Image (cartoon, helix red, strand yellow):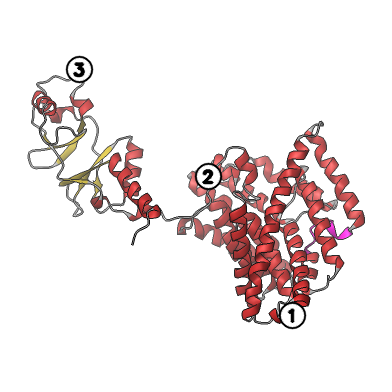
Amino acid sequence: MEQILTNRSRIPLRVLFLKPLSAAISIGTGGPFGAEGPIIATGGALFSVVGQWVHITTGERKTLLAAGAAAGMTAVFGTPLAAVMLAIELLLFEFRPASMLPVLAACATAAAIRTLFVGFAPLFPMAPLAWPHGPTLLACVPLGAVLGLVAVLVTRAVYAVEDAFERLPIHWMWWPALGAVAVGLIGWWQPRTLWVGYANITDALSGALVGPALGLLGLAKLVSWTIALDSGTSGGTLAPLMIVGACLGAALGHATAVVFPQLGLDPNLAALIGMSAIFAGASRALFMLVVFALETTWQLPGLLPLLIGCSSAFLVSSLLMRQTIMTEKIIRRGVQVPDAYRADPLELARVLNYASCAPVVLPATQRVDEVRAWLDSDAAGSNHLGFPVLAAGGELLGVLTRKDLFKAEVDSAQSAGSLLQRPHVVVREDATLTEAIHKLAAHDISRLPVTSEDGSSRVVGMLSRSDLLAAWREHMLDQHQRGC
């Protein structure tokens, strides 16, 4: 995410080799991480490196990076649609065909290749869920809220431990060694906390884990993963948080079944909601987590409960925490991360609605001294800053500004047309304001003649930067003013 936002999606070649190597060592020796994080980073690095070798734009390289990351996630979990949502919500920060199609193609390819090696089956198999009824759906609201609160606490705990490591009076090189000691001690007490632990998710979802075992595993996994992550060890965050959430959700489901049996909340359904909602609250990748849960379990009856629970967790997290577990670190480094996806209001506005009509024009044959005298007067239109220059037949030749006309080296006997030095740039009246902004920026100018939508060079108006600001101000008022 940081490379996309600050480094034009350029990931160094060394990351392509060092990231999987470091992750293999840390996870292979018992690190409490998921394999998905390193694979996502490796896939993104591979496609980013390819994007640096070929001649493409920064935007196209960002799309390639996101496609590689999404393909890596698909290869691990077999969840192509969830991987696409991951790319949209956490990497691309946009939703348009030019970005979506490469990501879709990469995920479909990764999913197809994955089936050749592991077959076609749910990653987390569980007993079929019953279709939920009204009271069960109602119970999903507080369940999701509790999980959202836990997501906030977990996120704050992660960064509190990281700050504690930074205050240690030793070189950062020794931090992973300290983390390994903690992971080993916790693993000796609770061996299930070691390694990726995808089987733990399956056991929590299927009811194989019950009673104190749920609480002990969830708490031990959380402590072990937090210390290992903040010590700088390489690994993923998705699987550990899902284990914690599944354990917590199952425990809450069992408690609800005892205290409020009339709600009919299945502990396995509660575990499924917990697995997704805790990460939805921590990362705000709401849709990705809902789709992920469905693709890894094949439990369609869980769709509506997942939407309710994850939305509730998302709401609580948004109210209590400004940043997410994914963005807090890079925001501390001064990087701003988009937090919303909105349609560009300038893309929806047309030039003809905001350009100044009936522009004040200058004949190409008019002498400079005559134009200066007119500008010094109080005549209508003489206070403008830019003027289209027209040939005798009304054809647009270019634009002159006050600065051009009052340059000391300009001979007052010259004609206005003789002062034109560069080709004129125009915008049609049926173009969008976004197109106009692109032309202003590309040519480093402050105003554009507006020509007729019939394709002729007939000037029908002028569009300046102040007109664009007026359009944006109108959009802001629409967003914030309340009316009848």
Write down the quadrant of residue 72 in the picture: bottom right
Q: Amino acid at mark 1?
A: Pro
Question: In the rendered view, does 431 fall on the left or right side of 280?
Answer: left
Query: Is mark 2 in CB contact (under 8 Å) with mark 3?
Result: no
Q: Quadrant of the C terminus?
A: bottom left
The location of residue 146, given as percent across then percent down, is 69, 63
Image point (73%, 69%), residue name: 271
Disc nearer the start of the sequence (2/1): 2
Q: Amino acid at mark 2?
A: Val
Question: In the rendered view, does 448 fall on the left or right side of 362?
Answer: right
Q: Mark on residue 159?
A: none
The location of residue 97, given as percent across then percent down, is 46, 59
The location of residue 148, given as percent across then percent down, is 66, 60
Query: Is mark 1 in CB contact (under 8 Å) with mark 3?
Result: no
Query: Is mark 2 in CB contact (under 8 Å) with mark 1?
Result: no
Say which of marks 1 and 3 sits in front: 1
Image point (71%, 53%), residue name: 153
Image point (28%, 43%), residue name: 467
Say which of marks 2 and 1 sits in front: 1
Is residue 468 visible from the viewing direction of this image?
A: yes
Disc 2 on helix, strand or loop? loop
Q: Amino acid at mark 3?
A: Ala
- Front residue of 436/71: it is 436
Q: Does the magenta segment cover residue 26?
A: no
Q: Mark on residue 408?
A: 3
Residue bounds of the magenta highlight: 191-198
Residue receiving disc 2: 54
Residue receiving disc 1: 261
